[in-house]
Amino acid sequence: MNRYSMNISWSDEDQSYVATCPEFPGLSAFGETPQEALAEAQIALQLFIDTYNEDGLPLPEPQVTRDNIRKFRISSSKPATPDSIDRGTPRGRS
């Protein structure tokens, strides 16, 4: 399992959630739910890693550290509902 970070946010423009991976600029994936965007991003991430390996390129260092490996943050202007988020903290709290 890799330890690359993922950011998930709501896109008003696309009317969907977007997941990105800061260590791999250009990697983004969309989904109707945060979970779907994350699942699609994990597929894309594996393709990025495979391509880097095939091309002999060094993989970027993961930005995730042992201290923050269990943190999960979603940024959204769309209201969160129990159906859209499995776990998390109420908006405005961390």
Image (tube, grey):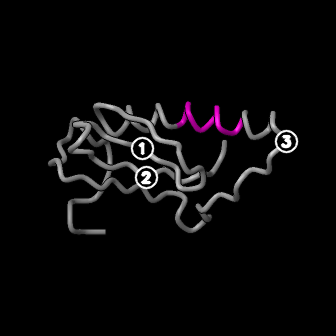
Main secondary structure along the magenta-highlighted residues? helix
Q: Earlier in the sequence, mark 1 or mark 3?
A: 1
| Relative to 8, 63 lies left or right | right
- Residue 36, given in percent of the width and then of the height, sits at 38, 31
Q: Which residues are magenta?
A: 42-50
Q: Residue at x 47, y 31 (%)?
A: 40
Q: Earlier in the sequence, mark 1 or mark 2?
A: 2
Badge 2 element: strand
Q: CA distance from mark 2 to mark 3?
A: 27 Å
Type of the residue with mark 3:
Gly
Residue to which mark 2 is pinned: 7
- Residue 61, given in percent of the width and then of the height, sits at 70, 59
Quadrant assignment for the C terminus: bottom left
Badge 3 element: loop
Marks 1 & 3, CB-CB < 8 Å contact:
no
Q: Residue at x 44, y 36 (%)?
A: 29
Neighbours of disc 3 within 10 Å: few (<14), some (14-19), many (20+): few
User: Image quarter for residue 38?
Assistant: top left
Image disc number at residue 56:
3
Q: CA distance from mark 1 to mark 2?
A: 5 Å
- Residue 45, given in percent of the width and then of the height, sits at 59, 38
